[in-house]
């Protein structure tokens, strides 16, 4: 059959237009992504992680619907560096935020972050809450990098409840409201990526009430004795290197835990903040359902740092001990088969994996500069033979108050190296037999070969991860 010139022209025009236009059906095949990040949330301070006191019903439901990672860690435990790692999928020594107190990402580095990649792929992007990377000057440029921008510099405000706000709305609730506004503004023919970064449960340092909760949660844990961690002992404190005993971690312990009554007040407020944050998680999940997109939205829930609640006589994070570097991670992917929902995995996951995982789950190419790995096969239960069994940890920020430290953690062993001590101070722990890291084996002849192997790994990782 001979084709007319007119019909041929129409076909050519259609082909040309299709090369420029993305059909709606291709958008609908891609899932939306919601990334919920909590500040300074201790790894086990959730019901789904074993806490019998804290009330986190909505997060616990996420764990039931998704996959919970029991061995999730950060590669640097401080706000701005860990957040930069989650944006870039890179170790601190590559992205530079936190190295020599650098606090911002350069424009070319930002172009390779997960928000920039999602936006370039046609997703509607939003950011809400504590941005945490860069100061006021850098923040002025960020609204143009997102379709919806409600990011805040620093700690996202001096107080959780601003005194000049007539509504007395807690920041956690405000961020929840903004998340609902973003979701409501999304269209059915365009996928979205929303990043919500709570500034709870980070303390308001130096304030009279560091963990002020939402008024709706006041008194929720009154009369309940919240136990301190097993390592909240003088014996554990005295085992620390002398320079750690004099560090910022001990200073903040004095702010919060030097008296039993004060410690209980702090812990109850901390738990109230967690419960208030959990309420907003529930509202967001409900909003996704109302919008009709819950069955096509991946939810990633994580924390940016571990957190010491008087462990070893210290407070906050930073160091290479388990309570400082371990964080919760839950991933809900509605496309997973029923058999994978509510499962727990023991594979080591890291904050460098967050960016490549979200991109991969959404079908967006992962930039080659990202050093993390997509958790997609682990989510599916594939147990890749080459999955990591160890990782490198580093912390260099604020060296005048926080002793710089690096470490190698394997599935069984941990090697800690305090890099600026003279002479260098080292620690070695057998996590299988000593999960609380109470017995330093550094001078044990029986472990000399293991020590040599870990020292070699420390040196190799330090060079390879540049």
Image (cartoon, rainbow, N blue to C red):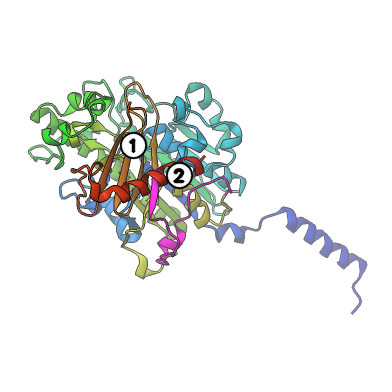
Q: Secondary structure at mark 1?
A: strand
How would you rate the neighbour count of disc 2 (Cα within 10 Å): few for under 14, some for 14-19, many for 20 or more?
some
**Quadrant hosting residue 403:** top left
Per the rendering, the mark at residue 417 is: 1
Quarter of the rendering occupied by the N terminus:
bottom right
The residue shown at (22%, 51%) is: 47
Mark 2 or mark 1, earlier in chain: 1
The residue shown at (40%, 30%) is: 396
Q: Is residue 215 visible?
A: yes
Seen in the image, is 155 located left or right of residue 58?
A: right
378 within the magenta span: yes
Would you say the residues marked 2 and 1 are in contact, meaning their CB atoms lie under 8 Å apart?
no
Residue 146 at x, y percent in the picture: 55, 37
Q: Secondary structure at mark 2?
A: helix
Main SS, magenta region, reads loop
Per the rendering, the mark at residue 390 is: none
Seen in the image, is 285 located left or right of residue 24?
A: left
Pick the front one: 433 or 71:
433
Magenta residues (range): 367-392
Q: Which residue is mark 2?
A: 461
Q: Is residue 310 visible?
A: no
124 within the magenta span: no
- Residue lying furthest bottom: 1
Residue 357 at x, y percent in the picture: 47, 53
């Amino acid at each position: 059959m001979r084709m007319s010139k007119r019909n041929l022209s129409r076909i050519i025009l259609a082909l040309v237009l299709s090369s420029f236009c993305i059909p709606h059906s291709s958008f609908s095949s891609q899932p939306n992504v919601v990334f919920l990040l909590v500040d300074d949330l201790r790894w086990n301070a959730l019901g789904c992680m074993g806490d019998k006191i804290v009330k986190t019903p909505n997060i616990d439901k996420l764990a039931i619907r998704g996959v919970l990672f029991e061995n999730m860690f950060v590669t640097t435990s401080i706000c701005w560096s860990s957040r930069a790692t989650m944006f870039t999928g890179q170790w601190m020594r590559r992205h530079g935020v936190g190295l020599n107190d650098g606090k911002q990402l350069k424009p070319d580095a930002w172009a390779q972050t997960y928000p920039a990649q999602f936006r370039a792929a046609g997703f509607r992007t939003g950011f809400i809450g504590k941005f945490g990377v860069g100061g006021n000057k850098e923040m002025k440029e960020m609204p143009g990098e997102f379709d919806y921008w409600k990011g805040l510099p620093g700690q996202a405000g001096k107080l959780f409840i601003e005194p000049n706000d007539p509504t007395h709305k807690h920041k956690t609730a405000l961020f929840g409201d903004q998340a609902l506004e973003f979701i409501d503004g999304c269209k059915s023919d365009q996928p979205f990526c929303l990043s919500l970064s709570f500034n709870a449960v980070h303390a308001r340092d130096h304030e009279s009430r560091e963990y002020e909760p939402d008024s709706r949660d006041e008194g929720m844990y009154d009369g309940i004795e919240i136990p301190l961690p097993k390592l909240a002992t003088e014996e554990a404190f005295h085992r620390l290197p002398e320079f750690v005993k004099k560090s910022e971690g001990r200073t903040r312990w004095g702010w919060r835990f030097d008296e039993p009554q004060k410690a209980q007040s702090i812990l109850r407020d901390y738990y109230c903040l967690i419960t208030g944050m959990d309420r907003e998680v529930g509202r967001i999940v409900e909003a996704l359902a109302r919008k009709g997109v819950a069955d096509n939205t991946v939810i990633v829930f994580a924390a940016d740092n571990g957190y010491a609640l008087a462990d070893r006589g210290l407070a906050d994070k930073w160091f290479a001990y388990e309570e400082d570097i371990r964080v919760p991670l839950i991933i809900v992917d509605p496309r997973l088969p029923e058999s994978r929902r509510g499962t727990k995995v023991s594979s080591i996951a890291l904050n460098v994996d967050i960016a490549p995982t979200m991109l991969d789950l959404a079908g967006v190419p992962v930039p080659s500069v990202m050093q993390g790995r997509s958790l997609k096969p682990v989510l599916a239960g594939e147990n890749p033979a080459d999955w990591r069994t160890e990782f490198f940890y580093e912390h260099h920020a604020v060296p005048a108050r926080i002793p710089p430290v690096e470490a190698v953690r394997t599935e069984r062993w941990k090697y800690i190296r305090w890099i600026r001590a003279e002479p260098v101070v080292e620690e070695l722990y057998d996590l299988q037999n000593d999960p609380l890291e109470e017995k330093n084996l550094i001078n044990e002849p029986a472990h000399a070969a293991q020590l040599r192997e870990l020292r070699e790994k420390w040196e190799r990782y330090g060079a390879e991860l540049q």
